[in-house]
Amino acid sequence: MASKMNISAVNNFSYDDFIKTFGNVVERTSSCVAAVYSQRPFASFDAFVSAINRFIDNLPKDKKEEILRNLSDLGDHLESLSPESQRGQTQAGVATLSFEQINQMKHLNKMYKAKFGFPFVICARLNNKDAILVAIRTRLANDENQELKPERD
C-alpha cells in the first residue's frame, strides 16, 4: 500500500514508476498525479496527497467535472472498477444490496446524474450501503457548487 512506502523511495521513482504506482489515486485520471510529479521531493506522504488535492482544487470547474464523469455509477459494474474501488464498495456492502435497494440506487444515480451531469461520488470505504443511500438522497438537494466542493477524509 502506498501510504506505507518510504517517502524517499517515492521521491526517487522514475516518472513511469510514479505513474504506475499512483496513477489511479484519482480513479481513471492519472493526469492528476502526473501533474504533481515535478513537485518532488515531497516532505511526507501527506505533502504528496496535499499536492494532488491542490492540483484538483485549482482546476477550472469543467475539468473537475471531467474527472467526475470518468467515474462509474456507484454500485454499477463492480467487476470493472479498480481493485481499490471494488474493495471499498464491497466493504460498504454495495455488492450485497437487495433487489429493491439496487433499483433504488439505480434510480437515485440516474436522478443525480441528470441534475449534476456526473455520477454520485462518495468514499464507500468510510460508509455502509444504508449511509450511501441516505447520502445520495440528501445530496440531491445540493447545488452544483456544493457537489464540486471536495470533502477530505
Image: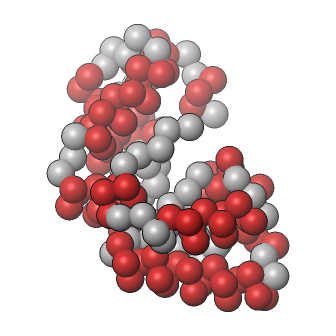
106 lies above or below 152: below
Left or right, residue 60 beside residue 109: left
Left or right, residue 8 beside residue 66: right
48 lies above or below 117: above
Q: How are the residues colored?
A: secondary structure
Left or right, residue 108 beside residue 149: right
Direction front: furthest residue = 141
Left or right, residue 93 beside residue 124: right
- Give the quarter of the figure containing the C terminus: top right
Front-most of residues 136 and 15: 136
For the point 30% across and 33% down, which residue is it? 54
Report x, y in % for residue 35.
Answer: 25, 38
- Give the quarter of the figure containing the N terminus: top right
Front-most of residues 104 and 47: 104
For the point 46% across and 15% down, which residue is it? 44
Can residue 129 be seen here? The reply is: yes
Can residue 86 be seen here? The reply is: no
Report x, y in % for residue 36.
Answer: 29, 32
Report x, y in % for residue 71.
Answer: 45, 66
10 lies above or below 75: above
Number of callouts? 0
Report x, y in % for residue 48.
Answer: 41, 25
For the point 42% across and 35% down, which residue is it? 17
For the point 46% across and 55% down, which residue is it? 27
Q: Quadrant of residue 56?
A: top left
Front-most of residues 61 and 47: 61
Q: Quadrant of residue 52?
A: top left
35 lies above or below 13: below
